[in-house]
Image (tube, rainbow, N blue to C red):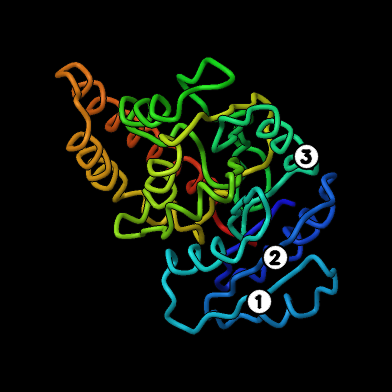
Amino acid sequence: MVSVVVPVFNGLSHLPALVAGLLNQTYPNLEIVFSEGGGSDGSLDYLRSVTDPRVKIIELPPGTSAAANWTAASEAATGEFTKLICQDDVLYPQAIEEQVHDLTRNPGAVMATAVRDIVDAHGRPIFRGRGLSGLTDDVIPGDRVIYECFRQGTNVIGEPLAVLFRTEALQTNQPWLDDNPLMLDLSMYSKVAPSGDVVVRRNSVGAFRVSNASWSTRLAKEQIEQTHRWQQGYANTHSLSAIDKARGFLGRHLQTNLRRAAYAYLSARGRLESS
């Protein structure tokens, strides 16, 4: 069984599309856990109206942090594999089937990841097949993958929608931590990936949405500092050469400038504003 876990907070505008996408997965053996983090927009009422028996709901109090919500959702997973997906992202119909195949075919892997598409606030494509830069093999030692994230100054693995975890590996490394919010996902990958291999897939399994309502867009101005903080923590626990550190510095600044330029371009054209 696969557990799909969805932390929710005021996500009503996107939930119907996400629920439809999850219920229409070609892989049928699912439990779908929604962890509602104390929002006020009617998300909980909507989720209660979903009658599919695979759907479960966790209710958390107002004031629950993002990391606590992600942790509660992940700890509720009972399947062999777990996929966490944010409320405004998109999962393509064959995503789980394909990534279950990747992990069952590679028993030494603790994570499977894939490229994903980037869409705007309205769901229109911006980029297709993004991610996995520098990861040239199909199965890669997890510590090498995290090193590549350091060297490039960015999360080359992708957002959680692109990842399928072995549940045991994910739950062993709880909780999720948002003391460095933009690194919430990468901080967890850094704990899970080194315990085994990472399988990579070159076709998109879903789409990450960028909009003014998304956390990553709102925090874009803080990206360089938060990435630096993550890199510093990595450097403190790994033996790195001066060249490694210089590459990490350059990668961090390059990726930050590219992201800021992309958001400025999209904002100027109204593509970050939800209708």
| CB-based contact (under 8 Å), mark 1 and mark 2 | yes
Q: In which quarter of the image is residue 257?
A: top left
Q: In this view, does 272 lie above or below 110?
A: below
- Callout 1: SS: helix
Q: Which amino acid does label 2 sit on?
A: Leu
Q: Please name the residue shown 79% across and 39% down the image.
A: 94
Q: In this view, does 259 lie above or below 29?
A: above
How far across and down, in percent of the image, does residue 223 sit? 31, 46
In this orientation, which residue lies closer to the viewer: 169 or 125?
169
How far across and down, in percent of the image, does residue 264 sit? 42, 43
The residue identified by callout 1 is 43
Q: Please name the residue shown 73% across and 75% down the image.
A: 47
Q: What residue type is labelled 3?
A: Glu
Q: Quadrant of residue 252?
A: top left
Q: Residue 15 carries which label?
A: 2
Q: Is residue 66 above or below residue 197?
A: below
Q: Which badge, 1 or 3, is on the more N-terminal residue?
A: 1
Q: Please name the residue shown 74% across and 60% down the image.
A: 31
Q: Quadrant of the C terminus?
A: bottom right
- Label 1 packing within 10 angstroms: few (<14), some (14-19), many (20+): many
The residue identified by callout 3 is 97
- Label 2 packing within 10 angstroms: few (<14), some (14-19), many (20+): many
Q: Which amino acid does label 1 sit on?
A: Ser
Of tags 3 and 2, the one toward the viewer is 3
